[in-house]
Image: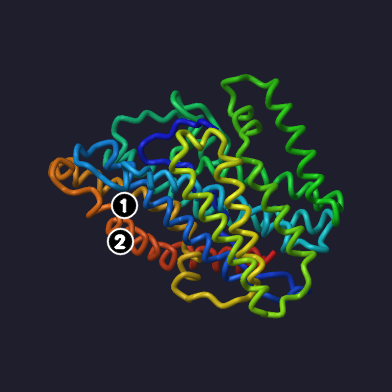
Amino acid sequence: MGKPQPLLTIDCVGLEKIAIVINANRGTKLPGIQVLRGIAASLVVFAHYAGCFEAFSPRYSWIVSRRLGDLGNSGVDIFFVISGFIMVYTTSGKAGPSDAWVFIQRRALRIYPLYWFWTTVLLSFWATGFALKTYHYSTLYMINSYLLIPYFNGSSFDPVLVQGWTLSFEMLFYLVFSCALFFKFVRWKLPFLLVSFTALFFLGGILSPDGGMRYLLTQPIIIDFLYGALVAEIVLRLPAPRNSFYQQMLPISLMCLGGIGFLYTVMIHAAISMRSIYYGIPALLIVLGAAMLRSTPCPRPLVFLGDASYSIYLTHNFSLMIFYWVFMHLHLFNWVLPDAVIVPATIITIIVCSFTYLLVERPMTRYLLFKTKLSSSL
């Protein structure tokens, strides 16, 4: 979509913390989908470190020269396709005002509290002079940041916690999807979403060019959610799996084909300008393959990585800021080999940020679910 990215942001992780708990009438879990979320979050971290060395290191980097860091741009597409898939898949058979109200409450509960927490932490660093000393935030900008309403800050529409730009699109999708539930589009969710987002696109076109709503309504990245909804409609119509060799080979082949599609993007300059094609379609194939695997077991560490992916996404920039500060003050960019640091730094950051899931996100979510008496499933 051609959106300029500051150093510590990337087209990545939109991010909805999914509890992969499928509705009772289906009675199955999708560990493969959860693993994909963890992989997407890891790609984002990797891309940030690659971008950091690209911007500040004079040393040669094979990772940077081959544009492998750009693969991190695919993270947000994977997340958005997963969101579209999960929302349709888990609401199969649900409709009506009551279901719509419960749905939007649960989505808001998943997105906002943890985002507010880490936004407040970052603003605290800013207010006390520990970080972001050159930034000047207006009250209106900070309010819009907390609400996930895009607001032009002089250079972009990113909120204070820059990763939140993807969450604005998540909330837009949830609001439109809740309307599909409200009006009881049980079998017509995908056509309703397609018509609704098309109408919103044209509506955004007549709004102020500098307005946040025009930015939000006219970005083609929204198509990724529709890809996910299409995946759900396909999977819901597939026969029950028989765990035969040939049935297992098809989803694996689809994921491999999607992976090849992602690798192909490193040879395309500015692939992000047509991301709904270059990143969206491979993401569709990978999510479709993972969903077709149904309840096929996956390694528990990878599933845990998916559990922690939202926390990793929201907090990894804190680790990256520390890394950047240390390397700049010790002049390490001038002599450290980038390829010897990028991967280890990525792994360490993922591990450290995973602890924030255990220490912050999981206790917070359990407390809020207990207080609101809402289950974690859809």
Q: Disc 2 vs disc 1: Cβ atoms closer than 8 Å?
A: yes
48 to 5, vertically: above or below: below
Answer left or right for 92 relative to 207: right
Q: Residue 226 in the image: state x and y as whole percent.
A: 70, 47
Tell which of 2 and 304 is nearer to you.
2
Name the residue carrying label 1.
Answer: 319
Name the amino acid type tagged 2: Ile
Is residue 161 visible from the viewing direction of this image? no
Is residue 295 visible from the viewing direction of this image? yes
248 to 85, vertically: above or below: below
Q: Residue 156 in the image: state x and y as whole percent.
A: 47, 29
Q: Can you name the residue that lies furthest to the front here?
A: 246
Q: Residue 33 in the image: state x and y as whole percent.
A: 58, 64
The quadrant of the picture occupied by the N terminus is top right
The color scheme shown is rainbow
Tell which of 322 and 285 is nearer to you.
285
Answer left or right for 193 relative to 218: right
Give the number of the disc on residue 193. Answer: none
Tell which of 122 and 238 is nearer to you.
238
Report crowding for label 1: few under 14, some 14 to 19, many 20 or more residues within 10 A (C-alpha): some
Report crowding for label 2: few under 14, some 14 to 19, many 20 or more residues within 10 A (C-alpha): few
200 to 79, vertically: above or below: above
Give the number of the disc on residue 348. Answer: 2
The quadrant of the picture occupied by the C terminus is bottom right
Name the amino acid type tagged 1: Ser
At mark 2, the secondary structure is helix
Q: Residue 98 in the image: state x and y as whole percent.
A: 81, 57
Q: CA distance from mark 2 to mark 1?
A: 9 Å
At mark 1, the secondary structure is helix
User: Which residue is located at x 48 percent, y 42 percent?
Assistant: 11
Answer left or right for 51 relative to 278: left
User: Which residue is located at x 47 percent, y 63 percent?
Assistant: 308
